[in-house]
Image: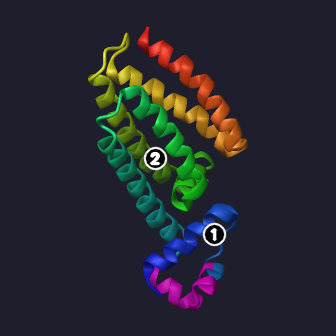
Amino acid sequence: MSKEQIKKIAIKHFNQFGYEGTKMAQIAEETGIRKQSLSYHYSTKKELFLEVYQDVVQEERLFVQNYFQDHAEEPIEHQLYNFLTEHKNRFLTNPNASFMLVLSSFTPLEVYDYVISQFRLYLAILKEEVAACFSKHTCRLSPEECAIAYATLLDGLDVQLLYENSQAYEKVQQITWNIFWAGVQG
């Protein structure tokens, strides 16, 4: 059993049972190895979690960078609005994206400092990419202020994913986008 397969199953368990409810024995059983063999790769659940979380945050940071690079020629309004939609779709279809968002929102105390520091790296890339978009566009706010407002908009939409459903997200996305866009345009 490879470490990548172990991590994939661990993400599934962390998503399903949360950090506290995930058991190393269950991960080992599902991967088809003994718990002692799993301990060879990861001596503790915390060690496994930290590695998985770091990998997932790195994957999501690359997604953000690639998204804005791939859509750089689109009008800024389309880039940013469509990113919100893509963000929702990733949460709903990509276990890694949902893992990062859920565990960043409901962070176990045992790994709190690490999770927050890693999630801040994600937010920094997001704000950097959004500020770069706004630096090519005339707005009443600075590019950095626009990026902070956009990250706050996304944060509010994430609440819809965590507590509501995709339809609520889409409805709130339309309403808040119009307010956001009018606000930065001045």
Query: Residue 144 appears in which quarter of the rendering?
Result: top left
**Residue 177 location (% of width, % of height):** 54, 24
Residue sitting at x 44%, y 15%: 184
38 horizontally vs 70: left or right: right
Which secondary structure, mark 1?
helix
Amino acid type, callout 2: Phe
* Disc on the earlier residue, 1 or 2: 1
In the image, the segment drawn in magenta is: 27-41
Asked if labels 2 and 1 touch by Cβ distance under 8 angstroms, the answer is no
Considering the image in quadrants, where does the C terminus appear? top left
> Mainly helix, strand or loop, the magenta region?
helix
In the rendered view, would you say 144 is above or below 84?
above
The residue that disc 2 covers is 119
Residue matched to label 1 = 13
Amino acid marked by disc 1: His
Magenta stretch: residue 37 in it? yes
